[in-house]
Image (cartoon, grey):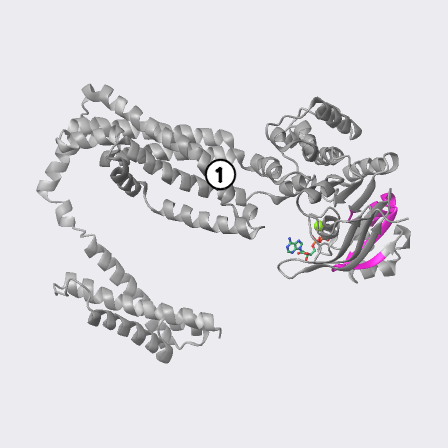
Amino acid sequence: MRAQIELLGVTKRYPNGVEALRNVTVRVYRGEFLAVIGLSGSGKSTLLRCINRLVEPSEGRVYFEGEDVTHLRGEALRRHRQRIGMVFQQFNLIERRSVLENVLVGALGRVPVWRSLLGNFSAELVQEALHNLEIVGLAEKAAEPVRALSGGQKQRVAIARALMQRPQVLLADEPVASLDPATAHSVLRYLEQLNREHGLTIVCSLHFLSLVRRYASRVVALRTGELVFEGAAEEITPERFRHIYGEEAEEVELR
Amino acid sequence: MSLALRIRALLADALLGAYIGAVVYRIVWGQILGGSPPESVTLAEWLGYAGCAGGFALVGQLARCTPGAWLLWRESMRPWQRTVAQHVVWATVVLTIWTGWSVARVSPVEFFSAKGLESAARLFGALLRPELSILDAALLAMLQTIYIALMATLLGLPPALLLGFLAARNLMRAHPVTFALYAVLRVWINFVRSVEPLIWAVIFSVWVGIGPFAGMLAMLLHTVAALAKLYSEQVESIDPGLVEAVESTGAHPIQVVFYGVVPQVLLPFLAFTIYRWDSNVRMATVIGLVGGGGIGTLLMQYQGLARWQEVGMIVLLIAAVVWVMDYLSARIREMLS
Ligand SMILES: Nc1ncnc2c1ncn2[C@@H]1O[C@H](COP(=O)(O)OP(=O)(O)O)[C@@H](O)[C@H]1O
Ligand SMILES: [Mg+2]
């Protein structure tokens, strides 16, 4: 069986010369919960963005469902992005608009441009948005402005926005890095539920190994742009841990 | 030592040398000491300044006792070299202030002359007894001024909005064609902005004739450029995270601007626009002075007739309206933020 996502020998060189990824090959299989770990600056965000092509690889190939998406442009690129949801560490919501309006942003790819400029979303889309808010347990907050929400709630709004894309894959770039531990678990449980019950493939960068062990079915580790580990979370021995995070790092700090 | 730094130091010394030469010859000798340099600058004079520039730079390189030398050899300078360089700087400052005083013809004697004080007292006395009977005419002229300013702001708004986005580096840099457009627009905006509206009014009055329309066009043009600059800077300082999030949904670039950029700039845009209307009212009174219509023109008419009590009335009215506009616009902007 071919993997759902294949990054084959991907290198990303930013215009300033930084090599954020070096010859990285990663396969993501349908329905798995893949964690991406590594120090900050190791290339996790870049790896995720090569999948939905917010970033264009300098070398190598990216396949999605067998289709080469490495250098897509224009309309084809937008169609590719639509099938992949993404959530971010900083939530990236429109703070002054309502929860519902923010969720509807996820449907922009399906709405004619001129209609979306008028803010004119069909009743079905609104219904679907409310349904997605229900999935993340926020249906009763639909009318509230996002800025009135807590961090955990904001991240759940962001998840609902991603669900509006009816995605096959959900990318999560350090989704809980700015949340307290209890809230982090509650957000990750929603991702886990989407993964288990809706069969959504999840690629999630995380900082804490305890979270990785608890939620991820598989782990890849990056170090200065290179893939240095691939396997189950249990296989990360203290020795491998030091290889990923450097000699000085102590596991306790990353629990 | 880097070549760039060396060139910078040489240039600094050369410019300083030429500047000191020109000021001493033209101002100190020509104006203050009563010498008589020729009206036009002769070739010999230009060559003289070039000599000053070269000489000073040369001294800087050899004796290492000039400001330029300080840029290069700051650490290794001897005390006397340092002292000389400092004195050169001080001498330049003194010379510059002396020049400014002379060029502006600052004259305490005239400021405190008996005749002058008497005229001033008459004028201020009249201003303090404003002629109330022209209040209705002044109010009408003031309304005209406010409407001229409003028109310039409203008509300037749509083009300024468009330019605000097209002149934002972060939106335009992706593609060479859009980046070229960005560069052209930046130059245009900076040029239009750097010419005062009063000067634009003079230009437009040749085009459409003296009057409110010329004044309005002048402010309109300046408003477009000034607002476009403010808007584009706001667009450039947005958080790219939201833009990226909207992009990641597969939205069209127009939708990305509408949902990723606009919500972040809407309130600041509104605040800038209100501020601009308020400064346009102030500008409109000034443009009225050169025939742009409204209250400024009325003021010039009474001033020409030396009717100081009427002038006093108008000045008070302008002050009151400007103060109210200032206050209102500040309060509205406060509410927006
Ligand atoms: N847009 C960019 N332009 C230039 N360099 C970048 C850009 N984005 C990331 N980088 C650099 O690429 C490297 C990897 O960054 P990133 O993928 O964000 O790592 P991580 O998410 O693991 O912190 C870092 O050195 C970072 O400074
Ligand atoms: Mg990152």
Residue A245 visible within the image: no
Quick check: which quadrant has ligand 1? bottom right
Region of the chain picked out in magenta, as a range: A205-229
Quadrant of res B254: top right
Instruction: Indicate the position of residue B59 as horizontal and vertical percent values.
Output: 33, 77
Number of marks present in the image shown: 1
Residue B98: x, y in percent?
A: 22, 59
Q: What residue type is labelled 1?
A: Leu
Label 1 CA crowd tier, 10 Å (few <14, some 14–19, many 20+): some
Please report the residue visible at 63 percent of the width from the left and 30 percent of the height from the top: A116
Tell me if A245 is positioned left or right of B150 in this view: right
Would you place residue A11 above or below residue B252 in this image? Answer: below
Task: Judge whether residue A119 can be spotted in this image.
Answer: yes
Image point 40% across, 70% down: which residue? B9
The chain ID associated with circle 1 is B
Location of residue B180 with respect to B323 vertically, above or below: below
Residue at disc 1, secondary structure: helix
Question: Would you name the residue on which mark 1 appears?
Answer: B162
- Give the camera-side residue of B267 and A180: B267
Taking the spot 61% from the left edge, 44% from the top edge, the residue there is B240
Q: Does the magenta segment cover residue A232?
A: no
